[in-house]
Amino acid sequence: MDVLSAIEKRREITHFKPDPIPSELLDKLMRAAYLAPSGNNLPSREFILVTDRKTLRTLAATTPYMKWLEQSAAAVVIVSDPQLSKYWLQDASIAGGFLWLTAVSLGLGAAWGAVYHSEDPQESERRECYARSQLSIPDHLRVVAIIGLGWPAAEPGPKQMYPLERVVHRERY
Ligand SMILES: Cc1cc2nc3c(=O)[nH]c(=O)nc-3n(C[C@H](O)[C@H](O)[C@H](O)COP(=O)(O)O)c2cc1C
């Protein structure tokens, strides 16, 4: 599938079939994350692939907004290092986008679970500490997001978008 088709098809998928994701596909997903660009080409962001059912269930409690991890076949936890790069958050985010589109191109579904909370440092710390403790993540790494992955069990209806002109400006704002 070409990139534009994957972009057009991409939706957040939150219901998954119980089937596992073959290891070749998991390798492709991790390679897409690895190949995502980063500021100054620094390896600020790192990825933890989780397929263990018990761990997925435990991770579902990281925030109230990722219950779908209980059903997903896998998850990729995206962590990033502010000590290594000032672009740590952008680096992690673009890698998540690459992962998501790659999942679509492979026929998989993905859901984005935000962990890092920019407006509430205490809540962010609580969430990140929880994920860190479950996965032995070093303290200096920020936990940006957990991406749930699996074979879609239900496709959402057509996407209701606001008009393109709401966000696209030409030549000047
Ligand atoms: C930065 C970011 C944070 C998000 N956080 C969550 C989340 O915590 N839980 C969740 O279920 N979906 C989350 N989403 C998914 C969005 O809600 C979803 O992409 C959006 O509603 C548009 O729907 P679509 O992906 O089907 O186009 C997040 C998406 C992004 C990009």
Image (spheres, rainbow, N blue to C red):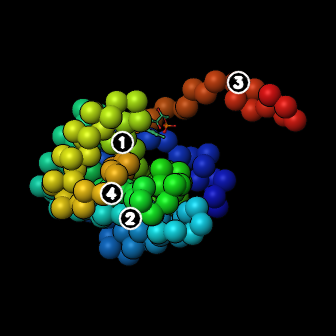
Q: Position of residue 85 (x, y in %)?
A: 49, 60
Vertical placement of 25 versus 135: above or below? below
> x and y percent of residue 157 in the render?
49, 32
Q: Amino acid at mark 1?
A: Tyr
The residue nearer to you, when weighing 24 against 34, is 34
Q: Residues within 10 Å of mark 2 (few under 14, many from 20)?
A: some
Q: Looking at the image, do the residues carrying marks 2 and 1 touch, with CB atoms under 8 Å apart?
A: no
Work out whether mark 2 precedes mark 1 in sequence or the reverse, and give the earlier one. Answer: 2
Where is residue 133 drawn, in percent x and y? 16, 53
Task: Please state which amino acid type lies under the numbered disc 2.
Answer: Glu
Residue at image coords 63%, 58%: 3
Q: Which mark is residue 166?
A: 3
How packed mark 3 is, by other alpha carbons closer than 10 Å (few <14, some 14-19, many 20 or more), is few
Residue underneath mark 1: 116
Q: Give the side of residue 119 with respect to residue 166, left or right.
A: left
Tags 2 and 4 touching, CB below 8 Å = yes
- Circle 4: element type: loop
Residue projecting furthest to the front:
83
- Quadrant of the rendered structure where residue 149 is? bottom left
Q: Return the residue nearer the eye: 132 or 170.
A: 132
Q: Residues within 10 Å of mark 1 (few under 14, many from 20)?
A: many
Q: Amino acid at mark 3?
A: Arg
